[in-house]
């Protein structure tokens, strides 16, 4: 037997972002002991850590670089996603500072968990080995289980954590079984070797490989919340604290999508004959169930949960595209999605106050008259989520549809467009409530500079990426 | 060289943004003036563009694409923010901004008691902007954006009086119908993009004739899908149900929707895409057929309505049917010419009707009006002008434009006897229903003595007078319009001369008017002058009761039956039912999803397992 | 007797675990069922590893065990907090969030 890990493949520079962030995450934990009651300091240290991580993502030049027996890859896709992860985690931390103060979440480990979770995402986005993918998914998931239940004496938060945990563990079982079968069929856990093997010899129709791939599809399907494995999402999104919900809806989902893309679009395109139809079906179902489910919702977080399910339906089209256009549209979609979601959640947090989160959409009635600027921002985010030009959400959708169209998925694109039209119904519902109904309650906003900053940043991002998408698009397309 | 034409679009947009942000801060009057000013300036810019365009040789007037900036230019697809300046778009600019401006001015007075005056003008500006964007777009993408914005603006304006439930419902209906159209358009655009790898008019229209043979399946599909959008906006059967209901909005809005903007979009679309439609003659026949049917159908509906605005609304549908008939048989410039004359006299009719309603303090039922010619002499004249134009009385604008279409429907290459017959029948109905309204409203005595109708002030009257003037004289510009638009459509339309047919068509219109007169007279007992004038004939030849019977048997009953049939079977049980049912089902499904989401972890796990087993089953056994 | 044997045994254990997860109402026992599923995976991996003569499977199994331990810790903590607020542990009653 040859040595398990070739010494020359150990390349610490390539995993610099992981190392930097891990150090900061542990540092924050230690600092928590001395921080006293206010945890704001920890938040800012965490943000500095994220900033450093983002910078260290560029440590490696001459991409792509494969290290650790080809199990860790630094390429354009992973660098772009590291930036997305650090951005979304930083935004999540920013909107949670005041929320945690207000809702009495005095846990310093909150920030360190967010950082650890980000480490998991980076691992997930960079891994080209089944073991590494599993590790990444578990680091992300375990952190999220805790984060979802971080409000220890809050019934809904507890319930969200329990549901997420039980179903997540259950899904992990399937994911692992699929990985084991793939290992059995190919004799390796490395995605690059698997891809070579499929290309060179006849494992193409190996049933174990196919079943393994399907089980992987299910495992990933759970993590990205695609139908019929989406059912945890509405409950968990509603029960988790708002900043955590926003965090979950962007970063971990993006990470799982990258892994999804790596396994299916990059490793298994040769045997796409069996998973392509499956994925098309799942994508269509996900759009429909997400959009139709959202129509009758009265709770804004639940509505957004269903809407995020439907967005996954659109994004899965990028995996189907299977080439660089697919990965570019995936990157662009997730960047815009991050801005929109954090903008919306920052506003949601602003509209609540201590002990009364004001999450029913009815409670937004008349916001347009009392607080026109905030209502206008909310309108922009809603329209962007619905995919109306000239906002970022539109360009993202257009780009992904265009990619799918070039691969010949005309029917899928038509269905996606139809779904976008349906989705307008509930996004506009929120706007109608804000502008066309009389207020049903007093507004007592908790506007703080940091949350306002996030809203402003998100608005700029949403409009900027809508009107001048070219720089980011060409960056994503390299 | 036409870069400044961007101002045509930007001005109303600025008006919208400014008014919606600062509307509450500035005095009411100034808000209204600002709203008018932007559209007025936009009209002036259009005139400049027109002047410059006329200075060029006819073949050089085409295809001036003015790019503001490249929106998306990376990789495989490009999207420019660009407008197209050519005779067709400038022609539409003139109508939209010109008539739109007059309607804005009229609204200054009409809406003066409304508490949300500035919001109204903001929406009007938005509407004008959206329509201009639709018309100016240089590719299918911005066409659809404008298309969707028009739908949005109409939703806001129809439902402007949001405390009025019927208005909110009507707005929602219009929105739903328009979204159906939008989806058709988007799918068409996707297919265009897939086939031509571009969305720009220039690329698509130049590539289409080489790439596709006549009546190619793909081309038929694309043209039909575009037509879904066109029919939804232009209220053709079966996507018309929103139009009569849209009357719930303020009257200037109705005038704007019906005359200058929105409903003309469908006709414009077919004219703009004439290259594609000429490759799909089957679709053209379909358009002409639907147009002719709509013309008749809407005519029958118009004959039995008592709401003054509803009658005019159905007449819009009917006239749009004419326009579609024209573009369907390939005489595009006649269709556009009728679009223009119709814009003038329909705006005139609506604004006059608005003046009547204003004068009658909101009353819209023509049975409660009467004798208004004394109380509102000016409105009386302008309404009459609109009515004679609509009915196609010789030498008015409606006469020229309608005659051209009716004549072509027989003589043009794609014309035939059936189209001609339907067009003439619809012309007869037109004369009848509009003069029925006229007689009810302005002749005789007042039927509600407790109201005191009053003439509208000058600021409302001025637009009426201008429109009346235009309605009367613009008919003589037929040749000019044909020459101007000719290069866009490849050739000027041939004007057919046929004295017999012409006479029949004119007689049909006049016959309609006469019938309306006779019916009206016979139903008015106390109409002294009529009795005296007609007494000898009246007593000698006709038993009054007898003619009522004949009329009742020959006209009222069948028409009412047809009207009721359409209203009941087609509108209520057909289109509306389907739309309502779909909405209901969607909500039902949504509830089903909520029910499935039971909150129980084990249900979720079971769903996952069932999903997984299904997937495995398919993979292993198929 | 070959890798089919390993496959059948592990699939059986996996199904028992899945069934247990679906049938039992106590989250603790559901958690144990999940552990059973993971163990079936470990069994499969180790079995394959010895057939294929590569170490990947064994390493994978070791990592799974480590991660599963971490997961159990978090899971027990969550179950504990929910027991504190609700004073009972029947997952069928935990359905405030729904719809």
Image (spheres, rainbow, N blue to C red):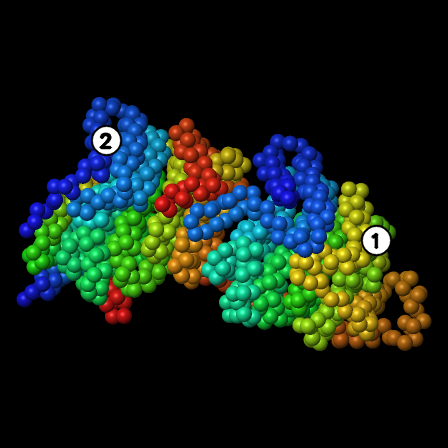
State the SS at label 1. Answer: helix
Of B146 and A93, nearer the camera is B146
Image position of A125 (left or right of B339): left
Q: Which of the 4 image quadrants contains residue B245?
A: bottom right
Image position of C45 (left or right of B253): left
State the SS at label 2. Answer: helix
Residue at 77% x, 59% y: name it. B478
Image position of A355 (left or right of B261): left
On screen, residue A97 above or below A270: above
Q: Estimate the x, y position of residue A297 in percent, counting from the top left.
A: 41, 50
- How many numbered badges does the structure rendering display? 2
Image position of B15 (left or right of A27): right
On screen, residue B88 above or below A125: below
Q: Estimate the x, y position of residue C72 in percent, counting from the top left.
A: 16, 45
Q: CA distance from mark 2 to mark 1?
A: 83 Å
Image quadrant for the N terminus of chain C? bottom left
Q: Estimate the x, y position of residue B490 in percent, counting from the top left.
A: 66, 62
Residue C39 showing in the rendered view: no
In the image, which disc is placed on residue B381?
A: 1
Of B30 and A297, nearer the camera is B30
Residue B443 showing in the rendered view: yes
On screen, residue B456 above or below A408: above
Q: Which residue is mark 2?
A: A24
Name the subunit of mark 1. Answer: B
Q: Which of the 4 image quadrants contains residue B404?
A: bottom right
Of A469 and B169, nearer the camera is A469
The nearer-to-camera label among 2 and 1 is 2
Badge 1 crowding class, 10 Å Cα cut-off, few under 14, some 14 to 19, many 20 or more, is some
Residue at 29% x, 61% y: name it. A272
């Amino acid at each position: 037997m040859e040595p398990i890990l070739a010494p020359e493949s150990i390349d610490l520079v390539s995993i610099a972002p992981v190392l930097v962030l891990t150090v900061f995450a542990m540092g924050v934990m230690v600092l928590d002991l001395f921080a006293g009651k206010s945890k704001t300091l920890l938040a800012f240290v965490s943000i500095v850590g994220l900033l450093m991580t983002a910078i260290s993502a560029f440590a490696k030049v001459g991409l792509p670089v494969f290290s650790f027996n080809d199990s860790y890859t630094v390429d354009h896709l992973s660098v772009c996603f590291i930036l997305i992860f650090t951005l979304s985690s930083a935004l999540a931390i920013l909107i949670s500072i005041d929320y945690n103060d207000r809702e009495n979440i005095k846990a310093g480990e909150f920030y360190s968990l967010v950082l650890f979770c980000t480490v998991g995402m980076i691992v997930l986005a960079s891994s080209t080995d089944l073991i590494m993918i599993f590790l990444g998914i578990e680091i992300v998931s375990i952190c999220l289980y805790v984060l979802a239940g971080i409000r220890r004496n809050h019934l809904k938060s507890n319930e969200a954590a329990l549901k997420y945990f039980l179903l997540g563990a259950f899904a992990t079982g399937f994911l692992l079984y699929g990985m084991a079968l793939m290992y059995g069929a190919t004799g390796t856990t490395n995605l690059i070797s698997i891809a070579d093997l499929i290309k060179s010899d006849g494992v193409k129709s190996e049933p174990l490989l196919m079943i393994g791939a399907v089980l992987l599809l299910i495992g990933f399907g759970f993590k990205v919340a695609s139908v019929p494995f989406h059912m945890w999402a509405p409950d968990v999104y509603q029960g988790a604290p708002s900043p955590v919900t926003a965090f979950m809806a962007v970063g971990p989902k993006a990470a799982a999508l990258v892994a999804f893309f790596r396994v299916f679009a990059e490793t298994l395109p040769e045997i796409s004959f069996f998973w392509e139809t499956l994925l098309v079906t799942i994508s269509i179902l996900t759009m429909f169930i997400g959009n139709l489910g959202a129509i009758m919702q009265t709770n804004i977080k639940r509505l957004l949960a269903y809407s995020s399910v439907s967005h996954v339906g659109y994004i899965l089209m990028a995996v189907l595209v299977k080439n660089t256009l697919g990965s570019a549209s995936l990157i662009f979609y997730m960047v815009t999605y991050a801005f929109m979601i954090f903008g919306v959640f920052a506003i949601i947090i602003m509209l609540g106050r201590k002990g009364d989160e004001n999450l029913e959409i009815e409670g937004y009635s008349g916001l347009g008259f009392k607080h026109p600027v905030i209502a206008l921002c909310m309108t922009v985010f809603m329209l962007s989520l619905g995919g109306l030009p000239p906002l970022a959400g539109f360009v993202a959708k257009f780009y992904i549809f265009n990619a799918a169209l070039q691969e010949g998925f005309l029917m899928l694109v038509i269905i996606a467009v139809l779904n976008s039209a349906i989705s307008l119904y509930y996004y506009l519902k929120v706007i109608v409530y804000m502008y066309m109904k009389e207020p049903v309650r007093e507004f007592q906003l908790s506007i703080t500079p940091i949350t306002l900053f996030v809203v402003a940043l998100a608005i700029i991002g949403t409009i900027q990426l809508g009107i001048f998408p070219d720089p980011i698009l060409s960056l994503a397309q390299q | 060289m036409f870069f400044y034409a961007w101002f045509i679009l930007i001005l109303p947009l600025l008006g919208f943004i400014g008014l919606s942000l600062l509307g509450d801060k500035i005095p009411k009057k100034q808000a209204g003036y600002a709203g008018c000013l932007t559209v007025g300036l936009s009209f002036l810019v259009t005139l400049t563009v027109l002047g410059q365009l006329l200075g060029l040789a006819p073949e050089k007037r085409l295809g001036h694409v003015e790019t503001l900036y490249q929106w998306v230019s990376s990789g495989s697809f490009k999207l420019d923010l660009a407008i197209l300046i050519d005779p067709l778009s400038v022609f539409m600019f003139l109508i939209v901004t010109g008539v739109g401006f007059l309607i804005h001015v009229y609204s200054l007075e009409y809406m003066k008691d409304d508490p949300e005056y500035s919001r109204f003008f903001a929406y009007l500006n938005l509407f004008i902007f959206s329509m201009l964007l639709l018309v100016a777009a240089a590719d299918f993408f911005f066409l659809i954006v404008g298309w969707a914005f028009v739908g949005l603006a109409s939703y806001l304006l129809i439902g402007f009086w949001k405390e009025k439930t019927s208005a909110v419902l009507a707005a929602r209906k219009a929105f739903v119908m328009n979204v159906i159209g939008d989806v058709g358009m988007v799918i068409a655009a996707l297919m265009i993009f897939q086939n031509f790898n571009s969305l720009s008019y220039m690329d698509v229209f130049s590539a289409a004739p080489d790439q596709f043979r006549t009546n190619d399946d793909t081309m038929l599909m694309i043209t039909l899908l575009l037509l879904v959008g066109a029919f939804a906006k232009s209220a053709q059967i079966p996507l018309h149900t929103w139009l009569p209901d849209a009357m719930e909005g303020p009257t200037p809005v109705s005038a704007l929707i019906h005359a200058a903007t929105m409903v003309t979009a469908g006709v414009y679309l077919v004219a703009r895409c004439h290259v594609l439609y000429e490759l799909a003659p089957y679709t053209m026949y379909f358009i002409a057929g639907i147009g002719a049917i709509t013309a008749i159908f809407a005519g029958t509906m118009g004959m039995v309505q008592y709401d003054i605005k509803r009658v005019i609304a159905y007449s819009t549908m009917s006239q749009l049917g004419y326009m579609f008939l024209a573009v369907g048989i390939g005489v595009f410039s006649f269709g556009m010419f009728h679009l223009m004359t119709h814009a003038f006299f329909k705006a005139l009719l609506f604004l006059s009707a608005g003046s009547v309603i204003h004068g009658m303090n909101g009353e819209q039922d023509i049975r409660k009006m009467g004798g208004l010619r004394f109380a509102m002499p000016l409105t009386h004249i302008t309404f009459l002008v609109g009515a004679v134009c609509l009915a196609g009385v010789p030498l008015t604008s409606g006469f020229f434009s309608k005659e051209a279409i009716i004549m072509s429907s027989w003589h043009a290459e794609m014309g035939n006897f059936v189209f001609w017959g339907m067009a003439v029948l619809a012309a007869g109905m037109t004369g009848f229903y509009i003069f029925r309204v006229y007689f009810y409203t302005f002749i005789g005595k007042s039927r509600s003595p407790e109201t005191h109708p009053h003439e509208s002030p000058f600021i409302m009257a001025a637009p009426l007078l201008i429109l009346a003037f235009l309605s009367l004289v613009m008919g003589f510009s037929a040749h000019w319009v044909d020459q101007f638009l000719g290069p866009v459509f490849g050739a000027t339309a041939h004007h057919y001369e046929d004295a017999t047919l012409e006479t029949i068509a004119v007689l049909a219109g006049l016959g309609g008017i006469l019938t309306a007169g006779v019916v009206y007279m016979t139903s008015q007992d106390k109409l002294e002058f009529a009795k005296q004038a007609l007494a000898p004939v009246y007593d000698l030849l006709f038993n009054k009761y007898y003619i009522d019977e004949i009329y009742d048997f020959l006209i009222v009953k069948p028409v009412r039956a047809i009207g009721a049939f359409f209203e009941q079977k087609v509108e209520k049980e057909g289109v509306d039912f389907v739309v309502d049912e779909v909405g209901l089902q969607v909500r039902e499904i949504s509830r089903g999803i909520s029910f499935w989401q039971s909150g129980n972890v084990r249900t979720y796990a079971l769903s996952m397992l069932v999903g997984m087993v299904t997937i495995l089953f398919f993979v292993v056994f198929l | 007797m070959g890798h089919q044997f390993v496959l059948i045994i592990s699939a059986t254990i996996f199904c028992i675990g899945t069934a247990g997860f679906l049938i039992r109402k106590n989250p603790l026992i559901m958690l144990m069922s999940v552990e059973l599923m993971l163990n079936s995976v470990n069994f499969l991996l180790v079995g394959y590893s010895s057939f294929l003569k590569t170490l990947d499977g064994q390493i994978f199994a070791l990592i799974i065990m480590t991660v599963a331990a971490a997961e159990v810790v978090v899971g027990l903590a969550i179950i504990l907090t929910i027991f504190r607020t609700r004073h009972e542990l029947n997952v069928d009653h935990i359905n405030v969030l729904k719809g």
